[in-house]
């Protein structure tokens, strides 16, 4: 003899206790057990009956029901954990983004203040170089100022910015631009001894 969904439903309180035992809250337990009934109804309609979950004595296989409830509870927890993780990652990215933007704007303001402290010629030439996007040679041809003067001014201003704000730049962007390497004393290009 096979069990029916109605008979399984008659033991509803027992299934709720099992779901709570697995760690579900009372509301979650109700949802899990209702989902179990739905799956059992689908199983009955596909197979024609529920003989596959009937034990030798003609009663419902409690281990099968326990496994269904436990698996449903585990799936629920996994989904909740994934949703929490996605929300936490989004919040963390948003906080990091806001922090990075704040640090970046603070750095720009600090560099601007440093530029305001410079001699007007150095400040204007450096800003003209940055804004124009032209090479030193093109600027020299356009302005009539020597390439050496433009190069020295730009290098001096960059050095001042590095000295005052290098740590902040490294904190936001990682390492600053690398300095050129000097050849070692034992260079292979020095000639033969």
Image: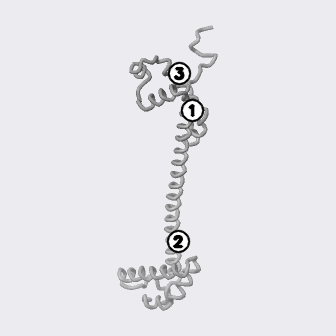
Residue 89 percent coordinates (x, y): 52, 58
In primary-sequence order, the first of circles 3 and 1 is: 1
Query: Which class describes the residues within 10 Å of circle 2: few (<14), some (14-19), or many (20+)?
Result: some
Query: Which class describes the residues within 10 Å of circle 3: few (<14), some (14-19), or many (20+)?
Result: few
Q: Are marks 2 and 1 in contact (CB under 8 Å)?
A: no
Q: Is residue 23 above or below residue 101?
A: below
**What residue is drawn where x is 44% and y is 89%?**
3
* Labels 2, 1: front one: 1
**What residue is drawn where x is 53% and y is 66%?**
81
Q: Are marks 2 and 3 in contact (CB under 8 Å)?
A: no
Residue 157 percent coordinates (x, y): 54, 28
**Badge 1 element:** helix
Residue 117's mark?
1
Residue 74's mark?
2
Q: In the depicted view, which residue is nearer to us: 175 or 69?
A: 175
Question: Mark 3 sits on what residue?
Answer: 152
Q: In the depicted view, which residue is nearer to us: 137 or 33?
A: 137
């Amino acid at each position: 003899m096979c069990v029916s969904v109605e008979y399984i439903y008659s033991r509803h309180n027992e299934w709720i206790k099992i779901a709570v035992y697995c760690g579900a809250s009372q509301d979650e337990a109700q949802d899990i057990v209702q989902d179990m009934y739905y799956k059992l109804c689908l199983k009955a309609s596909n197979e024609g009956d529920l003989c596959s979950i009937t034990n030798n004595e003609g009663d419902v296989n409690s281990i099968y029901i326990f496994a269904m409830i436990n698996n449903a509870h585990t799936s629920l927890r996994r989904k909740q954990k994934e949703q929490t993780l996605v929300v936490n990652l989004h919040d963390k990215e948003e906080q990091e983004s806001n922090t990075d933007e704040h640090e970046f704007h603070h750095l720009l303001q600090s560099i601007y203040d440093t530029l305001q402290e410079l001699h007007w010629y150095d400040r204007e030439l450096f800003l003209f170089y940055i804004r124009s996007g032209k090479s030193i040679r093109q600027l020299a041809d356009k302005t009539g100022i020597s390439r050496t003067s433009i190069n020295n001014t730009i290098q001096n201003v960059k050095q001042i910015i590095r000295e005052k704000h290098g740590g902040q730049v490294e904190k936001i962007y990682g390492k600053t631009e690398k300095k050129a390497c000097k050849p070692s004393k034992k260079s292979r290009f020095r000639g033969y001894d």
